[in-house]
Each structure stands twice: as structure tokens, then as C-alpha cells.
Image (cartoon, helix red, strand yellow):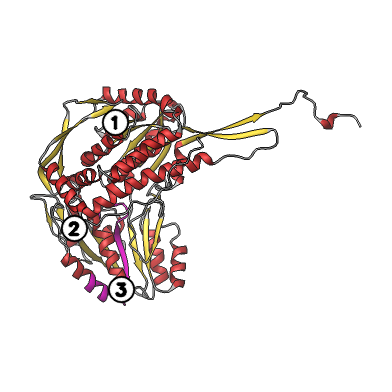
Amino acid sequence: MSAYRTPAPRNEPVLNYAPGSPERAALKAALARMSGETIEIPVVIGGQEFRTGRTIDVVSPHEHGRVLAKAHLADPALITKAIDTATAAQREWAAMPFTDRAAVFLKAADLLAGPWRQVVNAATMLGQSKTAFQAEIDSACELIDFLRFNVHFAERLYEEQPISSPGIWNRMDHRPLEGFIYAITPFNFTAIGGNLPTTPAILGNVVLWKPASAALLSNWYVYKLLEAAGLPPGVINFVPGSAAQVSDLLLADRRLAGIHFTGSTEVFQTLWRTVGTNLPSYASYPRLVGETGGKDFIVAHQSADVDALAVAMVRGAFEYQGQKCSAASRAYVPDNLWPAVRERVVAMMADITMGDVSDFRNFVGAVIDKKAYASISEYITTARKAKGVEVVAGGGCDDSVGYFIEPTLLKAEDPKYRTMCEEIFGPVLTLHVYPAAKWEETLALVDSTSPYALTGSVFARDRRVLAGASEALRNAAGNFYLNDKPTGAVVGQQPFGGARASGTNDKAGSILNLMRWISPRTIKETFVPPLDYRYPFMNEE
């Protein structure tokens, strides 16, 4: 560690994109430019670009006939090359002073806050069908926050040192892991795409980054941003490709040091099982850090504020097309409040506009792809036919131009109906109306219904109720909200992650996550070592 201190981090202010604002004009210009082009996205290993000829089309979810990019997929030879290149780069990168490593990511944050802001925002809007405000929060502000705060957390980590006795100097060498980190990033958040490879890299690790195919446009620009910030070749290698093929090769390599993952529970469990099977062949025990699924809840007490509850249900469930692992997916409303809640929620849902995100009047865009559309629409179709299930609002589906699914509110008499239990990952909220007198029983139901434990929220005016619910649901959510929607974690303010089937709860946006990417070495230096093996107690009286 150097004597220099990094700049104190602050959360990046969110621009509002109001009519007439300069950020609105700049974003509109970026959207127009990028909508009219089809770029090539290569594999990048050691700073060298490779075009394999095996390509996939990157399209706009809200206009799936629009091809935004042709992305080349890595073949086995390139995947192996990426491993060799990364591990060869580690010695120099790990030996680089922290201040120099930190400068790369601080510069990337400032570039993203400035000239790269609307490039990455527009790519996120076009490639992942997010509105201007959603992209601003995700691909600009949150990623800027991750970069700045993670540098700060790394500095704090390095400052963690043991005490020393007289004549002895004890110190802790916070080494990076020995080998490479495999970063597997999801489609739904550009910021996660940037955070998962950069967090280990800040600490001197080298990374193979496999971005989600549906987020390749924004992730490519994030990678180019890191290059522009001065990231040395080989530190982070950009390896789009078949998930199975990339994982098979990387998980079989003895140099695998860790996996940084966000995605489905099923995939993460498969990775864990494979690592377990291969454990005897690894040079060290790989670190497994994963944030997976959720079946996030809103539970309202009879004392809840109806207006606040209704807004939280609509925003929490339907923003980002429900494609957030933290999105509200099940709700429990007491019978005394249900008529008023229904009136307000239905009215808001009738007002929601959906369509091309380039039209800033739209509240939501399309779901990510054909597979997601088919899965989500099947839940709605089945619910229409199910006994005891009512489609209260929404439910329309249309994939003729884009993969559009209306925000949908279901009401289920059975609190264990499948849409109350299974992760849907789309704009579908299922609600169960419970007898107001059965509050304690409802809390037990909330806790036991889902295998997940990611996010959840409780609405009540009575402080005793909030305190009791917080204790009863202590293990039901890693991010717990009182009188707010169960979404919207801010770096440095609400470290994010859940337990149970939702992941390892290593809290992205905090120092806890960075601790997983070091292997500390304790150093003891004795200034004047003893010259006699005998101890004083051995002397004769």
C-alpha cells in the first residue's frame, strides 16, 4: 500500500432527462446513431481482437428485427488461449502498486460519468430494452458507484493490519487469488456486467469475462471503456461464447481460482457441483460467489398506508419489466385493505405505457428475448385457466414486433399457487388476500413459501408490527425494506445479496464482497532474533 489516499467516493447523481435537458438531447443523439448501425463484437484476449466467424445476432428486444451487432463466439482454442493469457498477465498486474491499479478504475468511472455516459446508456436501452431512466440508474450511476466504491473498499481492506509486539513487525499481505477468476454476468443489469469482472481485478486478480449473449452490446462498450481507462491487456479478457463450452473448459482447468456469478439458481448449482467434482485437480480451493434467483415479497399489515403500498407494488413489480432478481413477485394484502389497494393499483396499471424505449413516454419496454417471452406468457396463459386465480389487470402478450408482455396482476386464493412460489422473472405480480386477523400466520407463510431469500418488504404504520415482522422474517430476505418497494439497492448504502437459494450473500456494493477475492499472507518480522535456545525459566535458582 502506498501512502497516497484515493478520492472519497460518493454516489453518482441520477440525471432526470427532462424535456429540454442536455442529457436528454445527448441520449437521443446516441440512440439515433446506434440504431442505424450494426457493429461487430469480437472476442478480446490479451488486448487482441479475434473474429471467429461463428456469430450471433444481437437484437433489440422491443424490435427484434433490428440487428444491433454481430457478435463472434469464442472457440475452444481461444478459450484455452484466454486462460493462458490471463494467468501470464497476473504477475505484473498483481505487482503493480495499488494506486496505479486504482487509477484505472477511477478513470473508468469518470469517463462513464462524462463522455461515455450516453454511449453505455443508449446501448443498454437498445440491447436490453430499458427506459432512459432505468438505463441511467443501472448502466451509468450504479456502475460508476461500483467502480468508485470498490476502489475505496479495497483501500480499506489493505489498511486492515494486525498489531505488533515490541521488537516485532506483523503485517498482512492481501494477495490476489492464485489463478484466474471466471466472471459470468447476466443480461438484466449492465452494472453487474461491469462489476463482476472489475471487483476481483481491482485487487490484482485476472479475469475471464463471459457476458450474457443478450447484453453483449452494452457489455462490449463497458469493456471498451475499461480499455480507454488504461486497463492493461490480459487483465480482463472478453470471452463471449457458448455458456456450456466456456464453462466446461474453464472449470476443468487447475488454475481456476474463483467464480463470480449472477444468474439462475440452476446454473449456479450446476457450477458448484462441477467444481466439487473437480476439486482434487485444482491448485487451490476456488472461491464461489453467486447471486441467483428470488421470489421477492411485499407483505402488508392492516395498518399499512394504502397509497404507499399501491405505488410500491406497481414500481416494485413492473419497472425493468420485472426482470430484476429483486422485483416484487408475490404480495400479501389484508382483506380490510384489498378493495382500496385494488382500485389504486388497477388505475395505475391502466395508465402504464409500453413500447419502444426510444419513446421516452413509455414506462416499460420488452422482455429480453423469445425464450423469456415464451416462459412468462405460459404462466399467464395457465393462470387464466386455473381455478381460484383471477387476472385482475393486464395479461396481454404480443411478440409480433417485440417481446411485449403487459404488466400483469394475478390474485390467487391458494397462497401456494405456482405463481406465488416459482420465479417468473417478468412483469407478473401474484397477490393473495389474507384475513387481517391472521398476521402472524401470514408472516410464517411468507417465510416458508419460497426457497429464495433475496429481497422483501413490509408495510405497516405500527412500529411494533414492523419490529415483529423484521424478526419473524429475519432469514427470509438478505435485503429487507420497511415501507418501501423491495428493489433499488444503492452501492455503499444497501449492500446487495441474499441467502438460501438466492446465493452466497457476499453483498455486492460492500467491502464484504472484496474480501472474497484475496488470499491474505501473514508476515512476521523479528528485528533482533534470539541467539540462545534456552528460556529464562530454565535457569537455576
Q: Which residue is mark 2?
A: 380
Mark in the foreground, 2 or 1? 1
Element on which disc 2 rests = helix
What type is the residue that disc 3 sits on? Val
Q: Which residue is mark 1?
A: 246
Mark in the foreground, 1 or 3? 3
- Measured as percent of width and height from the top left, residue 279 is found at 44, 30
Q: Which residue is mark 3?
A: 306
Q: Is 398 positioned to the left or the right of 289 in the image?
A: left
Q: Is residue 184 magenta?
A: no
Q: CA distance from mark 2 to mark 1?
A: 34 Å
Q: Is 304 positioned to the left or the right of 123 in the image?
A: right
- Measured as percent of width and height from the top left, residue 264 is found at 31, 45
Element on which disc 3 rests = helix
Image quadrant containing the C terminus: top right
Element on which disc 1 rests = helix
Q: Nearer the viewer, residue 160 or 280?
A: 160
The label on residue 408 is: none
Vertical placement of residue 251 versus 148, above or below: above
Q: Nearer the viewer, residue 312 or 273?
A: 312
Q: Quadrant of residue 77?
A: top left
Q: Is residue 324 magenta?
A: yes
Q: Residue at image x 68%, y 28%?
A: 527
What type is the residue that disc 2 sits on? Ile
Vertical placement of residue 344 versus 150, above or below: below
Q: Do the CB atoms of the residues marked 2 and 1 lie less than 8 Å apart?
A: no
Q: Nearer the viewer, residue 32 or 89?
A: 32
